[in-house]
Image (cartoon, rainbow, N blue to C red):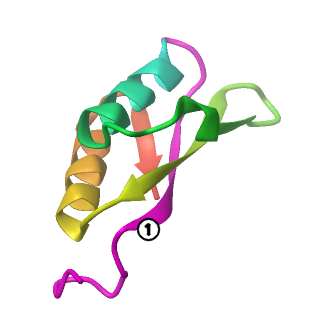
Amino acid sequence: MDKESLIDFPTDFPIKVIGKLGSNFRDDVMAIIKSHANDFEPSSITTRHSKSNKYSSITCTVRATSQKQLDKIYQELSNSEKVLVAL
């Protein structure tokens, strides 16, 4: 067990990402997650659009193996210009 986290690893962990619709937002999010979770399955993605069709919310479920891995995913998502929020 990772002593720096309250989460028991490995675990399936949902990551929600919000950004502007279009401009390959979904593909960019998938690429970031895939770079940190080799076994990420794109079929686990769920997508919702805002009522105005201006924003997209993507939830990706990853098989998280450590807090360090999750921290890296969130850091890279937060650094992306296309990502408004990563939860």
Horizontal and vertical percent position of residue 4: 17, 84
- Between residue 1 and residue 71, name the one nearer to us: 1
Q: Residue at x 24, y 83 (%)?
A: 1
Side (left or right) of 22 relative to 6: right
Residue receiving disc 1:
11
Q: Residue at x 48, y 62 (%)?
A: 13
44 part of magenta stretch: no
- Residue 9 at least partly seen: yes
Q: Residues within 10 Å of mark 1 (few under 14, many from 20)?
A: few
Horizontal and vertical percent position of residue 35: 25, 33
- Between residue 54 and residue 3, name the one nearer to us: 3
Q: Residue at x 25, y 41 (%)?
A: 36
Horizontal and vertical percent position of residue 12: 49, 62
Q: Compared with residue 19, is residue 62 higher up or lower down, i.e. above or below?
A: below
- Quadrant of the rendered image containing residue 67: bottom left
Instruction: Please report the bounds of the magenta region as a residue range.
Output: 1-23
Q: Compared with residue 81, is residue 85 higher up or lower down, i.e. above or below?
A: below
Q: Residue furthest top?
A: 23
Horizontal and vertical percent position of residue 69: 22, 56
Q: Compared with residue 60, is residue 50 higher up or lower down, i.e. above or below?
A: above
Side (left or right) of 28 relative to 66: right
Which amino acid is tagged 1? Thr
Dot 1: element: strand
